[in-house]
Amino acid sequence: MISVLHLARTAYLEILAEAWRVYPLEACGLLVGPGGSNSITQFHPVHNAAESSRVFTLDSLGYMKAERAADDAGLEVLGVLHSHTHTSAYPSPTDVAEATQPLVPTTWRWAIVSLAWGYPELRSFVISDNQESPTAGIAEESVVLSD
Amino acid sequence: MSETASSTVTVRLPTVLRPQANGQSTVELSGATVGEVVTALVSEYPGLKTNILDDDGNVRKFVNVYVNDEDIRFLDKLDTPVEAGAEVAILPAVAGG
């Protein structure tokens, strides 16, 4: 079954703006929407504490502020977005390792926007722990823009 | 007296840990240090323990603990004192490549 992630157009534009704003460093932030849904209605940019073009670390205070804003709006953090500046919009081995650590919800979306080809390519994945092969735990979902 | 007095503080939990704390986003607890507050937290909600602390009782590497917006790694770690009304935030370290 192929799942679908509905991404608000406004959130999509904010993702692109943040990705290009911090380029050539990796951008990152949190995807927010109604709890338990497949809808991302807000994007909250968070400072990349690693300040790197290869890796990202969500700044903890930024994480806290975004989660608090989501709480106040009656919404939930449903996933994380980051940019790839030199590679395609597909989870790296580092992404898979980090996505399967215990404090990352297994339901989280890992959306990746690649700027490697000079134009943005956005894809979204759910990443689960798979002992047989890291890539076997990567499930892509379709991203559909919504108003 | 003041150095050992227990203070009531607010502990803020990330979404992922709330199910193990009866769905609460914040919990009121007492302690004189961050370590005492965390001990009180995991004794009241035992399901949180292995998510926050390792077998030696240290904060796991993928967990960040902040007191009033300051990382305890740059303060006195679990010995960091807390005052009444302080906010202790448990935060997941989210990273990737």
Image: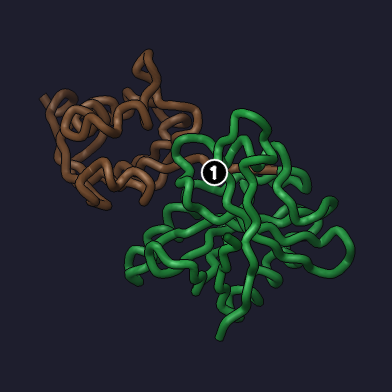
- Tell me residue B36's x, y (percent): 22, 26
* Residue A61 relative to residue B81: left or right: right
* Residue B53 relative to residue A146: left or right: left
Drawing shade for chain A: green
Image quarter in which the C terminus of chain A is found: bottom right
* Residue B77 relative to residue A84: left or right: left
Chain identifier of the residue bearing label 1 in the image: B
**What residue lies at 65% left-to-right and 56% top-to-bottom?**
A140
Vertical placement of A26 versus A36: above or below?
A: above
**What residue lies at 35% left-to-right and 71% top-to-bottom?**
A73
- Tell me residue B30's x, y (percent): 15, 35
Mark 1: few/some/many CA within 10 Å (<14, 14-19, 20+)? many
- Tell me residue A28's x, y (percent): 63, 56
Drawing shade for chain B: brown
Residue that mark 1 sits on: B94
Image quarter in which the N terminus of chain A is found: bottom right
- Image quarter of residue B46: top left
| Helix, strand or loop for disc 1 | loop
